[in-house]
Amino acid sequence: MTEKEEFIEKFKRRTKSFAVSVIKFYDQMKKTESTRVIGRQLIRSATSTAANYRAACVARSKAEFFSKMSIVVEEADETLFWLELVEEAELASTQRTQPLIQEITESCVKG
């Protein structure tokens, strides 16, 4: 396997693992109307980040690849927004949100 292929596979696993972590994070939250609404958006954007990265990996052209990667970055930034909102609204502790915020920031938003 080439270095590029290894990176692609590692990043597929990383984005999928992050999506699973977000799902588990939401499942452990106290359920209120606010957490249900925000949680659905959070799960949607986190899983979309992973799914769109996989789609980018099988793009048929450079243009399609860049289009899909733009969606990955957009969905990752939206995920970051929802996590920040959860934290600032005190719907979950900083101790629980910070590892997720750090991961999405490092891997997709600013990394």
Image: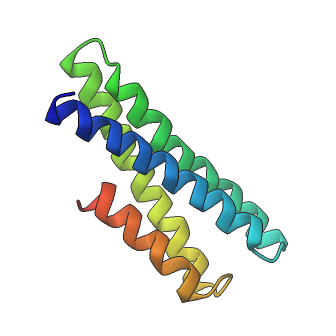
Query: How is the rendered protein coloured?
Result: rainbow
Q: Residue furthest front?
A: 1
Q: Residue furthest left?
A: 3
Residue 29 x, y percent position in the rendering:
75, 74
Judged left or right of residue 68, residue 80 is right
Residue 7 x, y percent position in the rendering:
24, 40
Instruction: Please state which of residues 50 and 75 is positioned toward the viewer in this rendering.
Output: 50
| Image position of 23 with respect to 30: above or below | above
User: Quarter holding the C terminus?
Assistant: bottom left
Instruction: Please state which of residues 38 and 20 is positioned toward the viewer in this rendering.
Output: 20
Name the residue at 22% across, 27% down. Answer: 1
Name the image quarter holding residue 22.
bottom right
Judged left or right of residue 89, residue 63 is left
Name the image quarter holding residue 28.
bottom right
Task: Evaluate whether residue 50 shows in this view.
Answer: yes
Instruction: Please state which of residues 96 and 78 is positioned toward the viewer in this rendering.
Output: 96
Name the residue at 56% across, 75% down. Answer: 85
Query: Count the marks: how many?
Result: 0
Name the residue at 41% across, 54% down. Answer: 76
Q: Residue furthest top?
A: 60
Name the residue at 16% across, 29% down. Answer: 2
| Image position of 19 with respect to 94: above or below | above
Task: Evaluate whether residue 38 shows in this view.
Answer: no
Residue 16 x, y percent position in the rendering:
50, 46
| Image position of 59 with respect to 73: above or below | above
Judged left or right of residue 8, residue 90 is right
| Image position of 110 with respect to 1: above or below | below
Name the image quarter holding residue 31.
bottom right
